[in-house]
Amino acid sequence: MAFGFIERQTKNFINIDPLQTGGRLSEDAKKALLEWGDGYSVCDFCTGRLEEIKKPPIYDFVNDALPEFLGCDVARITNGAREAKFAVMHALSKRDGWIVIDSNAHYTSYVAAERAGLNVAEVPNTGHPEFRVEPGKYADVIEETRRKGEVTLAVLTYPDGNYGNLPDAENIAKICHDYDVPLLLNCAYAVGRMPVKMKEIGADFIVGSGHKSMASAGPIGVLGFREEYAEQLLKKSGKYRAKEIEFLGCTARGVTIMTLIASFPHVVERIKQWNEEVKKARWFARRMGELGIEQLGDRPHNHDLMFFESERLYKISKRVKKGRYFLYRELKKRKIHGIKPGLTKHFKLSTYMLSKDELEIVIDAFDEILRRHSS
Ligand SMILES: *Cc1c(COP(=O)(O)O)cnc(C)c1O
């Protein structure tokens, strides 16, 4: 095995993996990657706290630009969306406390809650084919859960990472507040892709992922919250007075924050194209539908992340030589990457920032694969 520089196999592929489409670096971020790549590069300029570094302008970014962008009072940088969620859950955690989470939540919401010592109650979705999370269900589950113990936080995945559904977050925030439960919006697939402001929705915390949706090298995340939670979340160490406990003193201490900052103007601009992105996603879903590959979740869809169902591809997988890996291999031959190996009946993909020409290639590939294998 030869280590050293390794070329990336998917480099010149059309990549429709939802994990990848929003994290591709801007040209400025590529430059920042080289300029700030050395270990603790930003720490040359630190006087005790990451957010207080004036040059490079981390101070301005965290204290002005980011809160405005997220529509919140206070912002922090974390090492990922999951670390942001964990920081909030941990800061708010109570003995025998509960957290209410939508059933479309990402696994990291569960794991973070477990680590923070919270019991988890789930808000069910409507099931096949839409899998919607309805506001009223939050009321039901909070009611039920309150009988078992204190509900310290509610989480809404906005949108979720399976179906790309955007629930009625405003209404959910109102319902949570009727019960005095703060709401955290997990916007790993929203912040950096589409317009979203925490306070406009009425939530209390907002979480984003730099490497997923903000054209940044990772891991890095962003957290925004209301002033009233600042004391709890920004509690300082008793011994090291500058260091915030929930963030273990310091988070993104190197190149990741510099790529996030480098891409920020690009991200602010691209969000203005969101309507076009939604139109393109709907067009793509319609074309897939013409091939008998049905989009599940919200319809018409409001996000670039989409979940598809195909009985035909599934049936083909039952009789071809490569079995359920045939689709992955057929797409790979055509330099298309992003559908998990082994999936045929259900799979998700993203059309974000891909050109219509590239998406035509993807649609043609599915068309050809279906034709080739139809008996
Ligand atoms: C990807 C994803 C995460 C995890 O993001 P990290 O920044 O890698 O921790 C969390 N929640 C949702 C909904 C996601 O899609």
Image (cartoon, rainbow, N blue to C red):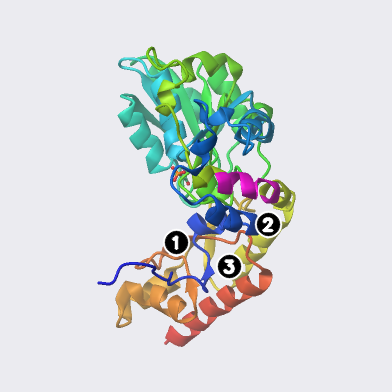
Contact? badges 1 and 2 (CB < 8 Å): no
Q: Which quarter of the figure is the C terminus placed in? A: bottom left
Q: Amino acid at mark 3?
A: Gly
Q: Earlier in the sequence, mark 3 or mark 1?
A: 3
Tell me: 18 left or right of 277. left
What stretch of residues is rendered in magenta? Answer: 258-266
Q: Earlier in the sequence, mark 2 or mark 3?
A: 2
Q: Which residue occupies 74% across, 49% down?
A: 272
Q: Which residue is mark 3?
A: 289
Please state, as top left, top right, bottom left or bottom right, where the N terminus lies in the image: bottom left
Q: Is residue 225 magenta?
A: no
The residue that mark 2 highlights is 277
Mark in front: 1 vs 2: 2
**Alpha-carbon span between mark 3 and mark 1:** 14 Å
Three-letter amino acid code of the residue under disc 2: Glu
Q: Residue at x 52, y 74 (%)?
A: 12
Mark 3, Cα crowd under 10 Å, few <14 / some 14-19 / many 20+, is some
Q: Is residue 192 visible?
A: no
Would you name the residue on which mark 1 appears? 347
Q: What is the C-alpha distance between the residues marked 2 and 3? A: 18 Å
Kindly state the secondary structure of the residue where label 2 is placed: helix
* Nearer to me, 120 or 310: 120
Q: Nearer the viewer, mark 3 or mark 1?
A: 1
Query: Which image quadrant is residue 143 in?
Result: top left
